[in-house]
Amino acid sequence: MSILKGKAFKFGDNISTDHIAPGRLFHLRSNLPELAKHVLEDADPEFASKMSKGDFVVGGNNFGLGSSREHAPQIIKIAGVGAVLAKSFARIFYRNAINIGLLLIECDTDKINAGDELEVNIKEGYVYNKTQDIKLPFPPLPDVMIKLLNEGGLIEHIKKHGDFDLV
Amino acid sequence: MGQTIAEKILSKHADRPVKPGELIISNIDVVMVQDGTGPLAVNEFKKMGKGKLFNPERTILFIDHAAPSPRKELSNSHTVLRDFAKEYGAVLSEVGEGVCHQRLIESFVNPGEVLLGADSHTCTSGALGAFATGVGSTDIAVVMALGKTWLKVPSTYKIVLEGEFEKGVYAKDLILYLIGLIGADGATYKALEFTGSAVKNMTMSDRFTISNMAVEAGAKAGLFETDEKTREYLKQHGRENKFVEIKADDDAEYERVININLSDLKPMISLPHTVDNTKTIDEMPKVEVNQVYIGTCTNGRIEDLRIAAEILKNKKVKEGVRLLVAPASRQVFLQALEEGLITTLVNSGAAIVTSGCGACVGVHAGILGDGEVCLSSQNRNFQGRMGNTEGFIYLSSPATCAYSAIKGYIADVREVL
Ligand code: SF4
């Protein structure tokens, strides 16, 4: 899975967990596949219906700010998004995404437009914007993240090792 | 080299001296979920197959976000939590007992401890000198089973507070000002440590308001050292024996120092749809309000209700405006009843809502209509937060809320003080 391909869906700065998984749909939290049909609805009502499996969510600064609801990264993953690309991420969202095995990439998303075809090369650490023919490098993922992603998230990690085996 | 409060507490919980940036495995004293995040945590916990809780007496499940339940799906989620608490011996906080963070400071968290909660405003307990931070349900599931978690030790911003608040200016105005100053991501991954001569004069309620909103600047924790006020608070809540001195070393290293003189501050408003979109009341255009909400883990304490009642005494809420008040906990509610505050508020036209999150999270009890404006004492004004993306949420102190409810628009409370 070291090269991911898909189309960019562009969002702005400060996309909150309320945009991703709004409180008004609180009652769907016990039904994540159903909630996933509404993913990012309050930022782009058509996103869920327009995206295809493997496509990328591309945000600006501070993506995922707000509540600790893990349902937000969960439904992005369940909807089939290949990775979330942003200039920066909010802390809890970042941590949740690692724990559940959703890939996050920090790069210069100003150089990505809506609809651009992207290729994410995890191993070599760059996003190739095929439409614009530019390479956007990103710093290597933290070791913890690679380990947890490879093992399928935190719960699988604990199941495998019986305890933390990260430090 | 000296240590900050965060470094000190985490060193103790990692059983070795820690430095900012390090990844550690930290022991956790208290762990909590609420009804929005709890069912998923319970699910993940069961997947691990550990069979029992690491520390059931300090694993707390709160039913507060949708309490009482407005829908059958949520009622079923509540059942999941009740059944889990019973089966595994965890502590359950029922409908009407109050908002999780208020209940935690009243009854569960002590200075020097580490609290992990599946709710972003878990940082509230930092005002008690506890390292308290919010994470997601999966993290919490693991803490429930193992009593520990992985953490990156944050570096610390020192916020030095001097001077005194002018009339009409409160802790809420200070924290809104700070968030406006550094931005909604201005302290991402950092701990905030509030210190300086002004802190000594601050009530615990002020400190809770400030710590509560640390996360709105992206911070991992919002910490205060402990002092006589902390001791007194613990005493009032039946656990003076849990007092310990928590204090940074004089030679601790801070990544950034921000100085604020409280006497320079004015009543602040945070405008839709981000918390850092702040203006002083002097810079505000006239904004008419449909709903005013006083409550939440930020500003639903007895001190807040006293301020609101004082302003609303013998006054009427403007026609066409609805004022909702949710005491943050049953304890607060009972105290407010005893002091006659509830009578005053209801006489002015307020509707009292069950102690809990109420309208804050957009699930029930105060969802906005299309185009409606709400002025709230809560901590967040994101688009859709109060259940409708077509609604507009402004944030302020409870005093500004109360006075604006009388005027019918966002008004300067200094006019009547
Ligand atoms: S009162 Fe609002 S901010 Fe506080 S815990 Fe409840 S929903 Fe969250």
Image (spheres, coloured by chain):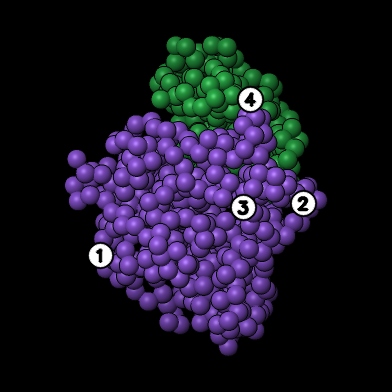
Chain colours: A green, B purple
Element at badge 3? strand
Mark 3–mark 2 distance (CA, rounded to whole Å): 18 Å
Disc 4, disc 1: CB below 8 Å? Answer: no
Ligand 1 position by quadrant: bottom right
Check disc 1 and give the amino acid type: Ser
Mark 3–mark 1 distance (CA, rounded to whole Å): 38 Å
Give whichever of B180, A99 is nearer the camera. Answer: A99
Label 4 marks which chain's residue?
A
Mark 4–mark 2 distance (CA, rounded to whole Å): 31 Å
The local crowd at label 2, few if under 14, some if 14 to 19, many if 20 or more residues have their Cα within 10 Å, is some
* Marks 2 and 1, the one that precedes in the sequence: 2
**Residue bearing mark 4:** A81
- x, y percent for residue A62: 47, 38
- x, y percent for residue A12: 53, 37
**Residue bearing mark 1:** B197
Specify whether disc 4 shares its chain with disc 3: no
Specify whether disc 4 shares its chain with disc 1: no
